[in-house]
Amino acid sequence: MSQTSFFDLMPERRVWKVSELTEQIRGLLEGEFPDVWVEGEVSNFHSAQSGHLYFTLKDPRAQIRCVCFRDQVRGLKFRPQDGLHVTVRGSLGVYDLRGEYQMYVSHIEPVGLGALQLAFEQLKKRLAEEGLFDASRKKPLPILPRRIGVVTSPTGAAIRDIVRVLARRFPNVHLMLYPVKVQGEGAALEIVEALRHFNRAKIADVLIVARGGGSLEDLWAFNEEIVARAIAASLIPIIAGVGHETDFTIADFVADHRASTPSAAAEIVVKSRQEFERHIAETQRQLVHHLRNLLSDRRHRVRDLQTHRGFRQMELLLRRQRQHVDELSTSLAMGLRLRLAATRQRLTTAGTRIAGLDLRRRAEILRRRIAQQQSALYAALDRTVTRKRRQFGVAQVRFARLDLRARVGKVRRKVEQRSDELALKMDRVLVARRRRLEAAALRLHERSPFQILERGYAIAYDASGKVLRSPDQVALGDNITVRLSRGQLDATVRNKKADS
């Protein structure tokens, strides 16, 4: 057989492009595995800024890349993490740019532990690390709230239990209900809006978030992160009464107080009238006991002070102080008299000096002296002119006389200017001296001991003119003089009485 006929028997060769082959493989994978469940361990997990999740699912012998887009992430109840054993559901496909096959995940659930339980544990751990469960941030409940807000379903058993308990314990309490869904789609958003409404309106003193018991799925609205953060941000104290006594939700940990049931929440929010009455009676008893102890302690202290040596000597100390005050008053009066006498002497001396310092009179004397000197100068000038006339003739004498007269006029003006300046200066000195004299007279008047008499006081003197400070200085029948602010009185001692 020839070579040409041999090649004619071989099948025709087809050359694929990479994109065509990749598209063909993708079609086969997507057609063969449109919906598969795969179990493995999560590794290389990371979240993109777009919200998509990327991770690798592996077992001891193989691995596969997985991607969960943002639309599917919203439906997940928990967040995958490295080392977590999960079962994922999705479809197989090919990523053309890298030529790798991968799995497009639509659902993830943990192996061995339910997704809701895992989500609960993850959120609880994260919020605890943020400090939302700390006791330091929890607000105290009011002792007697006037208005109570309730966030629950209007048709559930929780609101009926709350109303029944409050009507029995404190029937006149004001109760406000904000109806919400407590399970299902949108329940968490309604609960958050109810809490925000009460905080915006500020119409409640305390809030109760409640619902009856149920499964973890039924109570899941109270495990949502948005509900937990709304409770933590509330300015109004919140009591969480969700489920039965064995049920715990994230809302229970974040709330300011946790009640095992809605009925227990109603019992916590307000005490019964009997409890208030017992509390008031107990407080009254403690107050009376405390006051009795306080009064007894004060009595003992007063008794101790009365028996103290210093208290017994108080009257003696007061007498000594009175005597000391009298001595000081006498010294003060004597000092004021001496100061008054010295001030009067200074005033007299100053008046004499001022009277002798008549500046106008001295200025007039100076003017007279200047006039006399001027007349003498003119006479000397005439004599000089006469002499010059004899010596140099009439023309020369006129010239000399004119020159001397100009000089004399200049001297006269200077003398008159100095005289005016001297008179002005003497006037200023005289005004200043008068002001000092008036100030000294005013101080003398203010410091005068007789000013004290203007207030109604009086000074008593015996017959020898000595100031009386004690009734012991005079005898009955002695004549005394009483100095007043505007005169004096002569009196006779008829009675004496000393201060105790």
Image (cartoon, rainbow, N blue to C red):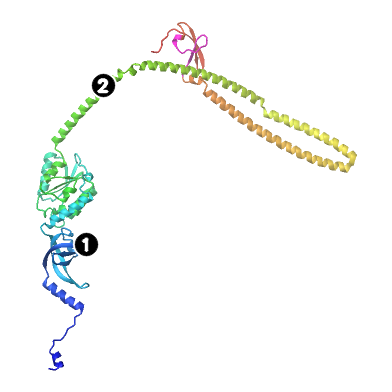
Query: For numbered disc 2, what is the local secondary structure?
Result: helix
Other residues around mark 1 within 10 Å, as few (<14) / some (14–19) / many (≥20): some
Q: Residue at x 78, y 40 (%)?
A: 407
Q: Which mark is residue 407?
A: none
Toward the bottom, the furthest residue is: 2
In depth, the one of 490 and 366 nearer the eye is: 366
Q: Is residue 253 visible?
A: yes
Side (left or right) of 9 relative to 460: left
Q: Which numbered disc covers residue 300?
A: 2
The residues tagged by marks 2 and 1 sit, at their Cα atoms, a distance apart of 78 Å
Task: Please say whether residue 485 is visible from this viewpoint.
Answer: no
**Nearer to us in this view, 252 or 134:** 134
The one of 469 and 460 positioned closer to us in this rendering: 469
The disc placed on residue 46 is 1
The x and y percentages for residue 135 are 21, 44
Observer-nearest of 483 and 319: 319
Q: Quick one: SS at disc 1?
A: strand
Q: Amino acid at mark 1?
A: His
Quadrant for the N terminus in the image: bottom left
| Occupied quadrant, residue 91 | bottom left
Q: Is residue 7 above or below residue 38?
A: below
Tell us which disc is closer to us: 2 or 1: 1
Picture coordinates of residue 286, whole percent (x, y): 19, 29
Q: Residue at x 53, y 23 (%)?
A: 445
Highlighted range, magenta = 456-472
